[in-house]
Amino acid sequence: MAGANRTGRPFTGDFAGGLLYSTLVKFGFAKGAYGARADDGLELIGARITNAVRCVPPKNRPEAREVNACRGYLAAEIAAHTRLEAILALGTLAHNAVVSALGLKRPAWPFGHGALHELPGGLVLADSYHCSRYNTNTRRLTPEMFEEVFRTLRRRIA
């Protein structure tokens, strides 16, 4: 097993974790040093990381039935946070899963890298391309682009 399947903390030990956790620290959503281990001492501050799909599927490509099966889990995660101000979705799959978990119509809330959606009830949904190795190697997502999403989100909830 590798990554979050091994460590129990999303993105820990995965390539994406390096970019995600360093950016969380830079923008004050975490403190400490990311060491790619669940016991590295990194602490989230006013943030929680969860997945749209609880188990990593074969080839890390969730099927619609898996996303649908996990919708209740995601909805419960969101509902459990009574002071929730914003959700950052990493990729279209996460964005669509959040919109569906909130009972909203997906066409009314399209994914767009860097977009901030003001959802009913005042919740903000921020979008970023997923910080996967594929997206960063192809430069679809650069560290600067990723940081700009966090910068915009931090200003919005400040």
Image (cartoon, rainbow, N blue to C red):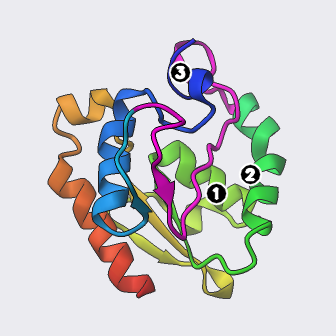
**Residue in view at x 62 percent, y 48 percent:** 50
Q: Amino acid at mark 3?
A: Asn
As for residue 138 lying within the magenta part, the answer is no
Q: Amino acid at mark 2?
A: Leu
Query: Is residue 113 visible to us here?
Result: no
How packed is label 3: few (under 14 Cα within 10 Å), some, or many (20 or more)? few
Where residue 74 is drawn, which disc sits there? 2
**Residue in view at x 61 percent, y 86 percent:** 122
Secondary structure of the residue carrying tag 3 is helix
Q: Name the image quarter holding the N terminus.
A: top right
Q: Quadrant of residue 139?
A: top left
Q: Which residue is mark 1?
A: 98
The magenta stretch is: 36-64
Q: Amino acid at mark 1?
A: Val
Quote the CA–CA distance across marks 1 and 3.
19 Å
Q: Is residue 155 above or below residue 139?
A: below
**Residue in view at x 36 percent, y 77 percent:** 154
**Residue in view at x 68 percent, y 81 percent:** 83
Where residue 60 is drawn, which disc sits there? 3
Q: Are marks 1 and 2 in contact (CB under 8 Å)?
A: yes
> Where residue 125 sits: x, y (%)?
52, 69
Along the line of sight, the residue nearer the viewer: 108 or 93: 93
Secondary structure of the residue carrying tag 1 is helix
Instruction: Of the two numbered discs 2 and 3 on the same chain, state the one appearing first in sequence.
Output: 3
> Where residue 74 sits: x, y (%)?
74, 51
- Please state if 42 lies on the left or on the right of 134 as rendered: right
Along the line of sight, the residue nearer the viewer: 9 or 127: 9
